[in-house]
C-alpha cells in the first residue's frame, strides 16, 4: 500500500511539473501566427508589435532579478498559484481585447506570472527531484516548449473557427485553470523553498555574469522565432495555419533536444561537447533559413528547434553545476535568468526593428548566427573541474 501511494505521488509530481511547464509559453507563441489580423485591427507596426513578445520577457527578467523577496514572502505554494492566476487573467482579458494598449497590458500581466513561476522552478526541481535533476529539467523544458508549439499550431485554427483572433489568444486560459487547480490540490511534495536569509544576488561576480550573458544569447533565437518565424513565411505567401504549423514543427524538435541532450548530459559532468553540438545545429539552421528558406524549410527549422531546446535545458543544468544548495540555486538562477531574459527581450524587438529598416528578416537571422557562433567559442570556459568553485573564487563580496 505504501509503495503504491509513493508511486502515485511520484507520478503526480511528474505530471504536475509537465502541466505547469505547458503554461509557460502560450502567452508568447499564440501571437505570431495571428499577427496579420492583430496588426490590421490594432494598427500596430512590426516594431511595436514586437513588444507583445518582448514585454513578457522583460517581466521574466525583472521578476527573476528582483522578485526573490516577494517569493520568500509568498512561499512556493502561493507564488506558483499567483503566477498561474496571472496567466489565467491575462488570457481571459485577451478574449475581449480590442486596443493595442490593452493587448500590451495582457502581455505584461501574463509575463509577470510566467516570470514568478520560472524563478521558483529551478530550486523546486533541485529539491524535489534530487537524484534526477537533469531528467526533470529536460522534462520541464520539453513541456515548456511543447506548450509554445501547441499554441502556435492551435491558435490559428481556434481563431478561424470562431472568426475572431481574440479567441485564438484567450483559449489558453483553459490549461492555466487546470494547472492552477492541480497545483492547489496537490502541490509538489517536500520542504518549501527557503532563500536562506537576505537575498544577495551575485552582481559583482564575473562567472555569474558570464553565465547570464551565455544563457541570454544561446536562447535568444527562440524569442525571435516565436515572434517572427510565422511572419517571415507569411511574407512568402504562406497562410497563417501553414506558418503556425512550421513553428509547431520547430517545437517538436525543441522537445526532442530538451529530452535527449539532458539524458546524455546525465552520463557526464562536462556539458561543453553537448552545448557545442546544440549551438552548431542552431547556426546551421539560421544559415539555411537565410540562404535556402523555401528549399528545405522544415530541415532548417528542425535544426534550429533541436539546438534551441537542447541549449535551454543544458544551460539550466549548467546553472545547477555552479550551485551546491537549493538556496544558492534560487539566487544564482534568479540572477542568470533575470539578466538572460532581459537579453532575450532585445531579440524580437531588434528583429522587428531590422525588418522595418531593411524590409527583410534576413539581416536579423545573420545577427543570430553571429551571436550563436560567439557563444560556441565561449563554451570552452565551462570546465567541470572549476564550475562549482568559480562563484566562490571570484571574490568574497560577490559570493551567493
Image (tube, rainbow, N blue to C red):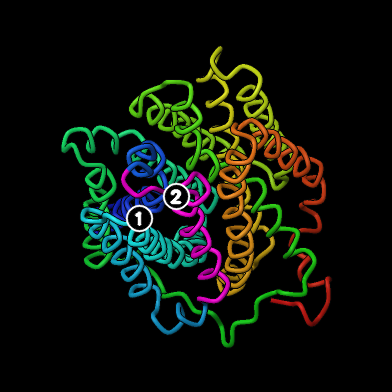
Q: Nearer the viewer, residue 166 or 133?
A: 166
Residue at position x 39%, y 70% in the image: 190
- Which label's residue is closer to the chain start, 1 or 2? 1
Q: Secondary structure at mark 1?
A: helix
Q: Are marks 1 and 2 in contact (CB under 8 Å)?
A: yes
Residue at position x 50%, y 82% in the image: 69
Q: Is residue 337 above or below residue 151?
A: below
Residue at position x 38%, y 47% in the image: 43
Q: Nearer the viewer, residue 121 or 245?
A: 245
Magenta residue span: 41-67
Q: What secondary structure predominates along the stretch shown in magenta?
A: helix
Determine the CA span between mark 1 and mark 2: 8 Å
Residue to which mark 1 is pinned: 20
Q: Quick check: 140 left or right of 375? A: left
Residue 55 at x, y = what percent?
48, 59
Q: Is residue 20 above or below residue 139?
A: below
Amino acid at each position: 500500500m505504501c509503495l503504491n501511494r509513493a508511486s502515485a505521488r511520484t507520478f503526480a509530481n511528474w505530471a504536475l511539473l509537465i502541466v505547469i511547464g505547458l503554461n509557460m509559453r502560450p502567452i508568447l507563441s499564440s501571437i505570431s501566427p495571428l499577427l496579420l489580423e492583430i496588426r490590421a485591427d490594432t494598427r500596430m507596426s512590426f516594431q511595436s508589435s514586437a513588444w507583445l513578445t518582448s514585454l513578457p520577457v522583460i517581466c521574466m527578467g525583472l521578476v527573476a532579478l528582483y522578485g526573490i523577496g516577494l517569493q520568500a514572502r509568498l512561499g512556493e505554494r502561493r507564488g506558483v498559484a499567483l503566477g498561474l492566476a496571472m496567466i489565467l487573467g491575462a488570457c481571459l482579458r485577451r478574449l475581449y481585447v480590442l486596443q493595442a494598449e490593452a493587448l500590451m497590458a495582457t502581455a505584461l500581466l501574463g509575463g509577470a506570472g510566467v516570470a514568478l513561476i520560472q524563478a521558483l522552478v529551478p530550486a523546486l526541481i533541485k529539491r524535489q527531484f534530487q537524484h534526477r535533476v537533469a531528467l526533470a529539467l529536460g522534462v520541464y523544458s520539453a513541456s515548456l516548449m511543447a506548450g509554445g508549439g501547441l499554441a502556435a499550431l492551435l491558435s490559428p485554427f481556434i481563431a478561424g473557427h470562431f472568426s475572431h483572433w481574440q479567441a485564438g489568444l484567450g483559449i489558453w486560459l483553459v490549461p492555466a485553470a487546470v494547472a492552477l487547480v492541480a497545483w492547489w490540490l496537490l502541490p509538489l511534495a517536500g520542504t518549501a523553498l527557503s532563500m536562506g536569509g537576505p537575498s544577495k544576488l551575485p552582481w559583482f561576480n564575473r562567472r555569474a555574469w558570464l553565465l547570464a550573458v551565455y544563457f541570454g544569447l544561446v536562447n535568444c533565437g527562440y524569442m525571435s522565432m516565436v515572434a517572427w518565424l510565422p511572419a517571415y513565411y507569411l511574407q512568402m505567401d504562406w497562410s497563417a495555419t501553414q506558418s503556425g504549423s512550421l513553428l509547431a514543427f520547430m517545437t517538436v524538435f525543441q522537445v526532442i533536444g530538451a529530452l535527449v541532450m539532458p539524458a546524455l548530459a546525465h552520463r557526464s559532468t562536462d556539458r561543453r561537447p553537448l552545448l557545442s553540438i546544440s549551438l552548431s545545429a542552431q547556426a546551421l539552421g539560421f544559415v539555411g533559413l537565410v540562404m535556402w528558406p523555401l528549399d528545405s524549410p522544415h530541415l532548417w527549422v528542425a535544426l534550429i528547434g533541436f539546438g534551441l531546446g537542447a541549449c535551454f535545458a543544458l544551460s539550466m543544468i549548467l546553472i545547477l553545476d555552479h550551485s551546491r544548495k537549493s538556496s544558492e540555486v534560487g539566487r544564482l538562477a534568479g540572477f542568470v535568468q533575470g539578466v538572460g531574459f532581459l537579453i532575450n527581450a532585445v531579440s524580437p524587438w531588434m528583429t522587428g526593428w531590422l525588418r522595418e529598416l531593411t524590409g527583410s528578416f534576413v539581416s536579423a537571422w545573420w545577427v543570430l548566427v553571429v551571436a550563436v557562433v560567439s557563444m560556441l567559442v565561449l563554451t570552452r570556459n565551462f570546465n567541470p573541474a572549476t564550475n562549482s568553485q568559480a562563484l566562490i573564487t571570484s571574490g568574497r563580496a560577490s559570493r551567493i
